[in-house]
């Protein structure tokens, strides 16, 4: 099941103070590119912090955690790097994705390759926060978040997760990595995230297949609203004796008593068996002169 949808997007903490956010140019999105940080720090707060004047700064810091060293990617004035999202641990230890800028900004993530071109132009990029590369459980959580985020982006931009893009005459997978960008001559010489993937037997082919499979899963049917059980309709009250009528509805007593006296009303053998509606009708007809007044 898709975790992220247009109605349920990832957490957002746009880093508008970063050089990347302030200077990157808009480009049409063409695909998704995976990175990993190459440093033993799985905490999102190391890389992601809100703007100093963000109206929801306190809330975001409570979710992300606080970086007391101000060496996150939003507060380094000499950092010329930028990606669209990060995946790592929140303050409560949960592994999550967080979007840090618009998807249609060029990335500053892979540099320029030997062809003179770069997948920064069109490939939405995110960093996976590495740990010491020995915790399979953490790796699997990050991997699944990466699959979820990539599937979300495929939905958002109608990407084919198993497809390729003709980019300056080079066939580039829609879903790719920093290492593959280098191998295609479209990025700098880095091995991420495959150096981490290799330790746990994952490949970018696995990513593509898992994203495609996730996108093919049917959305669960919404649970039907329970049909309320109708309240039982109470049986209308019946009156069997003149005493009951005199006590409950004295305005009908004279009419009913007269009809009993003249033999016009005798009941069912079990009593008079009169409802309130019947009492009203008899009384109205009597007062209108429509009932006999003698035996």
Image: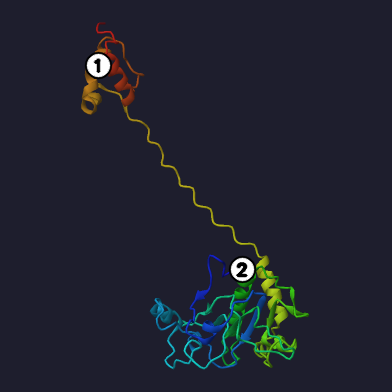
Is there CB contact under 8 Å for labels 1 and 2?
no
219 to 202, vertically: above or below: above
Display coloring: rainbow
Point out residue 147 in the picture as x, y percentages from the top left corner.
63, 76
What element does badge 2 sit on? helix
| Tag count | 2
Between 75 and 283, the one lying in front of the other is: 75
- Alpha carbon separation for disc pair 1 and 2: 78 Å
Among the two numbered marks 1 and 2 on one chain, the one whose residue lies closer to the N terminus? 2
Quadrant housing the C terminus: top left
Q: Quarter-wise, where is residue 36 in the image?
A: bottom right
Disc 2: which residue: 156
Q: Residue at x 49, y 89 (%)?
A: 72
Instruction: Kindly indicate the quadrant of the structure image that contains residue 6.
Output: bottom right
- Asked whether residue 88 appears in the rendered view, the answer is no
Mark in front: 1 vs 2: 2
- How many residues crowd mark 1 within 10 Å: few (<14), some (14–19), many (20+)? some
Q: Classify residue 179 as left or right of residue 90.
A: right
Q: Position of residue 272 (x, y in %)?
A: 31, 20
Q: Nearer the viewer, residue 23 or 268?
A: 23
In the picture, the quarter occupied by the N terminus is bottom right
Q: Nearer the viewer, residue 137 or 180?
A: 180
User: Compared with residue 80, is residue 222 higher up or lower down, i.e. above or below?
Assistant: above
**Residue at image coords 71%, 74%:** 209
- What residue would you read off at disc 1? 255
In this rendering, position of residue 208 left or right of residue 130:
right
């Amino acid at each position: 099941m898709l975790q992220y949808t247009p109605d349920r997007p990832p957490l957002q903490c746009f880093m508008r103070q970063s050089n990347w956010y302030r200077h990157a140019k808009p480009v049409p999105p063409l695909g998704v590119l995976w990175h990993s940080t190459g440093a033993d720090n799985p905490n999102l707060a190391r890389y992601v912090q809100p703007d100093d004047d963000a109206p929801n700064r306190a809330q975001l810091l409570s979710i992300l955690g606080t970086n007391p060293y101000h060496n996150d990617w939003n507060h380094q004035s000499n950092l010329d790097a930028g990606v669209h999202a990060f995946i790592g641990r929140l303050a409560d230890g949960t592994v999550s994705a967080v979007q840090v800028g618009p998807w249609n900004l060029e990335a500053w993530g892979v540099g320029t390759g030997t062809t003179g071109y770069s997948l920064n132009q069109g490939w939405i990029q995110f960093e996976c926060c590495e740990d010491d590369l020995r915790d399979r459980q953490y790796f699997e959580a990050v991997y699944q978040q990466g699959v979820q985020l990539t599937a979300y982006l495929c939905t958002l931009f109608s990407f084919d997760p198993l497809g390729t893009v003709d980019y300056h005459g080079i066939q580039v997978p829609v879903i790719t990595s920093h290492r593959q960008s280098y191998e295609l001559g479209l990025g700098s010489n880095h091995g991420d995230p495959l150096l981490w993937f290799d330790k746990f037997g994952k490949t970018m082919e696995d990513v593509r297949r898992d994203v495609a499979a996730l996108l093919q899963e049917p959305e669960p049917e919404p649970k039907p609203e329970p049909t309320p059980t109708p309240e039982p309709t109470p049986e209308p009250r019946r009156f069997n004796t003149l005493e009951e009528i005199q006590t409950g509805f004295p305005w009908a007593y004279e009419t009913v008593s007269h009809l009993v006296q003249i033999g016009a009303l005798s009941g069912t053998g079990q009593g008079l068996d009169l409802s309130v509606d019947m009492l009203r009708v008899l009384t109205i007809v009597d007062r209108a002169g429509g009932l006999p007044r003698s035996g």
